[in-house]
Amino acid sequence: MSLQISNIRSKPKEWPVMERDSGQEVIVCKSIKNNHTEVLEAAVIKALEYVKTQGQTSVSIYCPLDKDLNTSIQAATVAAALEGFCKAQSYLFVSALSVFIVCPNETEWANIMKKNLEIVWACSNSKQNGMQEVIPVIPQNISVRLVSGTLEENQVQAIVVPVTVSARTNSIKLSSLCTHKPSCNLEELLQIQSSCLVDKLLKGQIIPVTCRGSGLLCEYLYLMEVQDDWRDPVEKLRGLMYKFATLSHRLLLTSLAVPVLDLSRHKVQSSQVVKWLLEGLKMFERETSFSWLHSVWLVLSPDCTDFKPLGICFADHPFFIQYLQDSKQAFMEISLKLKKTSSSFSIFKMSKKCCLSVSPRGYVSGGMSLSKWKTEQGKVYNSLRSRYSVKSHYIPNLTQVEKYEPALKKLQSVKVSEHERCVVGLTEEVNKYIQIADLNRHVKETFSNKIWGDLSEKAIQHVAKDLQLELVTHFPGVIALQDKMKPPNTIFQGPYKSMYSAIDVFMKLISKALLCVFLSDKLSDYKCSFLKSWNLSVLSQTLFHARNIRATLKVQHSCLIIQGGSFEDNQRAMEVLNDDIYETEIRISHASQASTMGVKWSKQLKDISYTFNKSQKKVEIHTIPHEDNINIKVLLVGFKTEVHAAKCILDQHFHDNTDIKGIVEFKQPHLVEASHRIVEIIEEKNLLGVKLEVNIYTNSKVEIILTGPRSEVHKAQEILKRDLNSVVVKSMKIEGLGAAHYFQDPKTTEILKAVGSAYFCIITVRTQQSIAPRRLEDEKFICDSRIEKLTPDELHAVTKDLGIMLHRGDGGLSLEGLKTHVDEAQTRLEDILKTVCFLIS
């Protein structure tokens, strides 16, 4: 069967059931209202069988047959009908039937039809349909076919027609030695040519007659007179064959059909006639270096009974013939079945294309025609052949497919062609093989990087990591690769049945990732660390669920994420985190770095932690170096309210504990005179750890510089002012023998120094000569017994900011200094004495 698919611009409005046109029948199915595909398939098969019984050689099927039926389903149904029709025919010696599938003017319809034909129905592409004798003498360059059938049905360019010429009636008729029944067209042509060709034929010439306009399939008829004188049939048949071949070569013809004459009355079998004809063709081939003639058909009558075939060759699908060569089991099954009919089965390899051969083990039984014998063999072969299928089906990467699905190797009858486009074997196993192979066929799918959407690079890495874990666990045959683009394209490779399931997992991971917010991309490391320190379920309840936000904090691959129910939930959750979780830093100068060290700093941090992190952690404090590696900073992270409160505490701590310099200035003459020894009268506990330095300015004033934390410096300043302003000078005169010598002794000096250090006073020894008269602007002595009861603070209040000198002795107090200052100090002293008196009373 040959197929052709073509398009038509429009279909007829009404299709008749049957019509005749120029002697040819056209069978068209009526429109089928029933949508059942079984009805449509049966109708097509019945129509084809009817065409076959009417002896037609071609038929057209106008599609669509049912406008209400889906295009793909209808195409598959027509293809199945063609396959069913072919399987019902004999694989041996069937005459060709050309089927034309005529489609609407729609490329899509034709493509669908063609695809279904390629998948469902694998037809043979061989042109060697028919019978061919296997003989030892075969021309090398000319293809010879021995066929059984009507002489005129052979599609060749020239046909040899043996005729009998009657000079009396001046007529030409088909010779009785040619057992083929002539058609009306042939008889008409012979009658037309009779008057002009009789004389030439009687002279023994071979006359080529053109068939143009005669209705015959060939281009030329070679007319020759055949006489009954066959005394030397060998040389005569050889010579005739030689002349036929030579004439065809001169006419530039490539194919020729020669009838096998019936010489049984001369006791010559048809097989011997064929042999002598081939010897003549071989002779032509030896004498001709190049020939236009390529194909010769030797035509036997279908009713031939005296022909003992050495073997009959027939074509089948080339891949099935190859399958029989490779599969001993299939070959032996057919061979043993034919053996029971006294025939041998083999693969004939002497032709240009391999074909199959069936040969009788003895002579064909008497009375059985060659046609009947061939039919019997065909039935046997056909019943065996129908168990096998040859299907055109492309299976890419077959080795990889078999690796994915080891069950394919269990279908032992199935073989696949070398180009992986044809599957041969038992029908049931072939169908199963194709089904399994389709599910496991190696496919490749590429996803553009646009699929990642707004995912960050880290999120993409997590998706890729999760995907690889899923593939290893559930889809070991699937491979997912990523290129070097940013973001990357993703390429999937693997078996069809599992790759798209893996792709579904991939899409779900992306969808899940799009609803996951990786906080490491949104928040600082310190915020993430603080959040991780919490019980995330409790924290999610506190921050999100209490606000009706469907989001949860989780840790995935050591990364903190928000898993939301929707993009809106994720957005709201991020807003809550940005509002509630706060991070701030306090930059600390080099002068304040000391405040972040020592016990005091540790105690401050513990106090803050105790205050704000009693039940749950609300704030974290980190002390870290700054970028310049000189200054440092303190970073606070936690809930916004607690972070602000902790920052205020630390700001105050740094304010109070930053190192500063404080200066206390004194102009009192006795303090200036004490010079650097003034340190001896200052108690160390009053300094509060502050460093002290004394500067003297040319007997006019003394400065005490205090260095240390601000709060301690301020306290030390007040204490020094109070204490040093209350310092008094008291002198006593020691007379007696050896007094001067005693106080000049170094041991006495050490004793006085030790006593002064113990009582925080300065003891100075002066000789009478060394005491210089003082020049004082004013001096007053106030005698009052209550003066002895005054405290240092009260005395400091008397001299504060006045720069006068006090001398206590003889039950009173002496005031020395500027007159105005002395008067002011006297007024202050009197006010204090009144207060003391009032308190006593």
Image: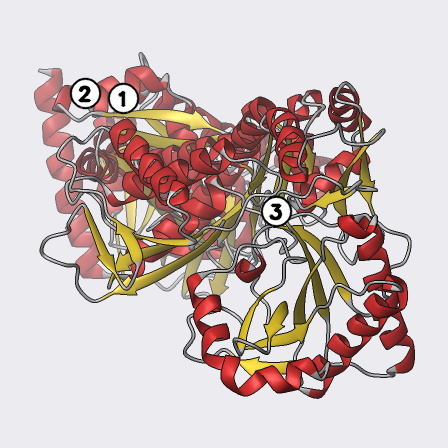
Type of amino acid under label 2:
His
Secondary element under disc 3, as helix, strand or loop, is loop
State which tag comes first along the sequence, 1 or 3: 3
Q: From where the camera sits, is residue 661 visible?
A: no
State the image coordinates of residue 787 (x, y, percent, origin top left). Answer: 25, 30
Q: Is residue 227 above or below residue 822?
A: below
Type of amino acid under label 3:
Arg
Q: Nearer the viewer, residue 229 or 456?
A: 229
Q: Determine which of the numbered discs, if any, sits on residue 80 in the image.
A: none
State the image coordinates of residue 545 (x, y, percent, origin top left). Answer: 19, 20
Place residue 156 in its image quadrant.
bottom right
State the image coordinates of residue 285 (x, y, percent, origin top left). Answer: 86, 75
Mark 1 crowd level (few <14, some 14–19, many ≥20, 10 Å Cα) = many
Q: From where the camera sits, is residue 15 visible?
A: yes
Residue extending farthest to the front is 168
State which tag comes first along the sequence, 3 or 2: 3
Marks 3 and 2, how far apart at CA: 61 Å
Residue visible at 75% across and 22% down in the picture: 341
* Image quarter hosting the C terminus: top left
Q: Determine which of the numbered discs, if any, sits on residue 545 in the image.
A: 2
Q: Determine which of the numbered discs, if any, sits on residue 421 in the image.
A: 3
